[in-house]
Amino acid sequence: AQSVSQHNHHVILSEAASLELGCNYSYGGTVNLFWYVQYPGQHLQLLLKYFSGDPLVKGIKGFEAEFIKSKFSFNLRKPSVQWSDTAEYFCAVNGGSQGNLIFGKGTKLSVKP
Amino acid sequence: DTGVSQDPRHKITKRGQNVTFRCDPISEHNRLYWYRQTLGQGPEFLTYFQNEAQLEKSRLLSDRFSAERPKGSFSTLEIQRTEQGDSAMYLCASSSSGRVNEQYFGPGTRLTVT
């Protein structure tokens, strides 16, 4: 069965610090990979996605993620976080012909001003 | 706003009562999904439709749960004989049927069973 593991439950950073959130998945075939963000009081929003091609994908608000197939990883990065990046971040995978997304448990990011 | 909408946003009910939630997807999307999210967890898949056909159901979807999408547009999710364990956020998402399956989520319906 597919699964997604997010390494950190809660990350606390100061503004301008660099961010890397880990995500590993288990699935042997072709996958589509996503990062969603949920700002306080708002609904889930798509941050970025990977489905083929360049393994380094760029999303909104300066976020990027790198797909490393050999490590089954899709880590999220941002060089310099802002207070407004405070949110919960979810990694998700969709494999093969399945319609549904499998989500990780999420990582809560708190950015101190 | 042409995003996914859900109604109601909050529902408080007593154990044993039936509840029904509605989801209106983005108009050009033919796929519609239901997920459930509890505190400290990511969304968990319940079921999805392509047009009016229900294509997949999770084992989380017990016999007390039923979902419909009669005309391939809006969908309803009904929970019969609610239990306290049903308390959660119920999320709806929609997508087109392309290969990438990029899903757009609604604001959710928060259910509290007392």
Image: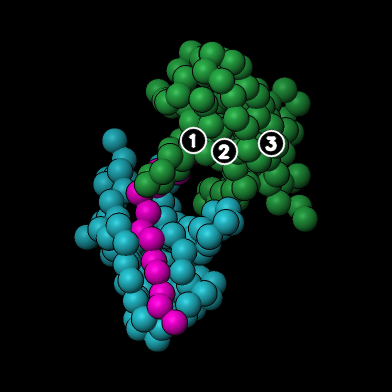
Chain colours: A cyan, B green
* Residue B77 visible in the shown view: yes
N-terminal of the two: label 3 or label 1?
3
Q: Are marks 2 and 1 on the same chain?
A: yes
Q: Is residue B64 above or below residue A83?
A: above
Callout 1 secondary element: strand
Q: Is residue A43 above or below residue B72?
A: below
N-terminal of the two: label 2 or label 1?
1
Badge 3 local density, few (<14 within 10 Å), some, or many (20+)? Answer: some
Marks 3 and 1: CB-CB under 8 Å?
no
Marks 2 and 1: CB-CB under 8 Å?
yes
Give me the C-alpha separation between circle 3 and circle 2: 8 Å
Give the residues drawn in magenta, as a range. A100-113
Callout 3 secondary element: loop
Residue at mark 3: B8
Q: Is residue B50 above or below residue B84?
A: below
Residue kind at label 1, given as amino acid type: Ala
Chain of residue at mark 3: B
Residue at mark 1: B88
